[in-house]
Amino acid sequence: MNYHSPVLLKESVDALAIKEDGVYVDVTFGGGGHSREILSRLGPNGRLFAFDQDPDAQQNKIEDPRFVLIGENFRFISRFLRFYGVKKVDGVLGDLGVSSHQFDAAERGFSTRFDADLDMRMDQKSQLSAKVVVNDYEEKQLADVLFLYGELRNARALAKAIVEARSERRIETSFQLKEVLQRFLPKAKEHKILAQIYQAVRIEVNQELEVLKEFLMQIPDLLNEDGRLSVISYHSLEDRLVKRFIRTGLFSGEPEKDFYGNTNEPLKKVGKMIIPTKEEIKENNRARSAKLRIATLK
């Protein structure tokens, strides 16, 4: 399997301040780059659990007695760790979004570069694919997805064009979708707009923001006292949720104050947000939008 080297590898693992005999979780296993780096810093009694629902990623399993790969979505982190008798951990690392391998595997339908079936499922068992979103969602529902998750101002016009086109015939492939929307894709911005459309559909198919929220809400109860959370996000929608949750323990609104005007946020940030170096971005284009945020219990 072709997996690129992970973005912000050293920085995101340094952020965990690894103890040799600690228990750690890599919730986005992918090609196993972060997991290997964590294992290299653990002693013989350390333990690492990793999550990945993608069967392709599961083929990269590491043979190491300290390591367990759980083939599930990380929204169920606490439930599956409990299954292994783990209630508290010393650190959790998440590298959000789509792996380079998923983008590069044409048949998965994640990339605008290939003509492939509209799929985009990270979990191949899921019923909801890009094809369902594009062909079966009502016009308003489709416009909402494009506006909320793709941040596309002309979401209504795009949705209308899709609905009109699919009444003639179903839109089955990525190039068919591109053809339908061609008039909204000026040459200079074609790639950027298509990427936003794909991002919107992909987030809907995989419920990425819901998954992220459910995951973050479990972190305060999961971390040991000086445990660390290290999260890399790639677009503003994810980063906003991570930043807000670290700051307030909420995803919207402000925390309630007690009688003395104090608030009770569960986490506090560690250091400043970290972004990749120019050199790393040159080597790995995917790094250009990466942001790493670190937190610990308050």
Image: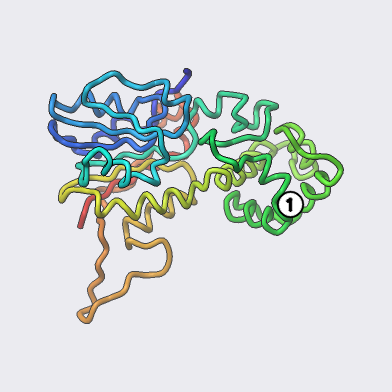
Q: Which residue is mark 1?
A: 159
Q: Find numbered disc 1 in the image and state the secondary structure of the residue it sits on.
A: helix
Left or right of 165, for residue 8: left
Left or right placement of residue 146 versus residue 282 in this view: right
Q: Quadrant of the C terminus?
A: bottom left
Amino acid under label 1? Ala
Q: Residue at x 40, y 52 (%)?
A: 214
Give the residue at the far right of this rendering. 168
9 left or right of 137?
Answer: left
Q: Position of residue 90 (x, y in %)?
A: 19, 42
> 294 or 133: which is nearer to us?
133
In front here: 165 or 276? 165
Q: Which quadrant of the structure image shows residue 201?
A: top right
Residue at 49% over, 28% down: 100
- Residue that appears at 54% across and 33% down: 124
Q: Position of residue 294 (x, y in %)?
A: 29, 46
